[in-house]
Amino acid sequence: MISFFKLSKDDIIKKIVAAGFPAFRGKQLIDWVYNKNVFEIDSMTNLDKAFKEFLINNIKLINLETIKLVEDEKGETIKFLLLLGDRNTIEMVIMRYLDKDSSKNRNTLCLSSQVGCKVKCPFCATGTSGLVRNLKAEEIVQQVSIANSYLKQFNAQINNIVFMGMGEPFYNKDEVLQAASLIRENYEISSRKIAISTSGIIEGIKELADKDLKYVLAISLHAPTDRVRDYLVPINKKYPLNQLIKACRYYQQKTKKRITFEYIMIDSMNIWPDDARQLANLLKGIDCHINGIPVNSVSGSEFKRPKKKDMYEFKKLCEEYGLSFSIREEKGTDIDGACGQLRNKERK
Ligand code: SAH
Ligand code: SF4
């Protein structure tokens, strides 16, 4: 079996030609999948019988099945629960940024890289069950087509990718980088519009730097001291802040790219005035932007969302220290928008 979503468009055509069919058949198949978002070979009306038969016996297309779809009231956040071939489930989320001028609409896909995650950040719904398995590149790439097939009704398609769903992308580095490269090529999404978010796996950051891959690097920082970060992002015990920041400086020196730091804001935990001061100290000299994310409380959790006033005071203080800081527009909190939450509910 040839896995369709593991190959570039050129390689698909090569396989089809090697099997004795003319190249235009391959182009037709590609048109059905990537332009028309049709994944059922039987529905591809312009293919002849012999070619359809070949495809049915030799090509594996979509094998992820949407088993639940939740939209928020405004239709801006759409959350999918997807069933994998081995009955595991993952989540993905489409975030739509709608403009009066519809040509300016942005559609961002938050996709998953693993089933579960072994980093086990205590506030994160994905981490609670540990790592189940890595996703294969083709399982990652398919998520984009599934999202596009949903967006077809709006005449829209995904134009931004964030690896911020379930899993730690750099603990599945090879498949994630292969998937990112296929997404770039097959969906024509430039690397500047693909963000990889990591809890701070140094080898991954270094590899992006050394290969000069132009993806957007996002680091889940969440705390300016090892004491608090050890607790919030347990991988910090293995890769403490001084190593992480050193890797970020190395990355920036090599790529000249701005780094995004994600900073979950938790009441009475990491937004004290002194945290702003230490954060500014830690990030001194790095060209970066900080994305403050109000924590999404998993029910019954000790992690409470701060008061609005406290979050904005923290932002203001950070800005006074010279940091560029924004508070992420909230999306999807009414539909369990933080990845892993929908899946946990379903499992229960
Ligand atoms: N594992 C990677 C990428 C997936 S998590 C990472 O940690 O960076 C993507 C982002 O969602 C991270 O910044 C993570 O900290 C955040 N996140 C996880 N649980 C959350 C919650 N309950 N509320 C708000 N953000 C959350
Ligand atoms: Fe894993 Fe990221 Fe969740 Fe931490 S926040 S447990 S690294 S998915």
Image: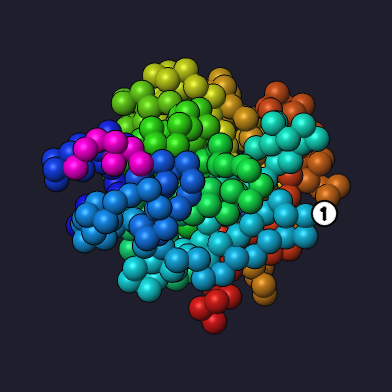
Instruction: Tell me the quadrant of the picture where the N terminus can be found.
Output: bottom left
Side (left or right) of 290 relative to 254: right
132 or 63: which is nearer to us?
63
* Residue 42 spot, x, y in % from top left: 37, 60
Q: Point out the image quarter for the C terminus.
A: bottom right
Which residue lies at the image location 69% right of the left edge and 31% below the top edge?
103
Assess whether residue 23 is covered by the magenta stretch: yes
The residue that label 1 is drawn on is: 307
Q: What residue is drawn where x is 58% and y is 75%?
A: 345
Q: Name the residue rendered at 72%, 26% in the picture.
A: 321
Q: In the rendering, at what x and y percent does residue 141 appear? A: 40, 48
Tell me which residue sits at (55%, 38%) in the image: 160
Q: Residue 55, can we see it?
A: no
Secondary element at image label 1: loop
Q: Where does residue 196 sit, x and y in percent of width and height?
A: 47, 40
**Which corner quadrant of the image does residue 74 belong to?**
bottom right
Q: Which residues are magenta?
A: 21-28
Q: Is residue 345 visible?
A: yes
Within 10 Å of the Cα at label 1, are there few (<14), some (14-19), or many (20+) other Cα atoms?
Answer: few
Q: Position of residue 239 (x, y in %)?
A: 39, 44
Dominant SS in magenta: helix
Image side of residue 14 versus residue 46, left or right: left
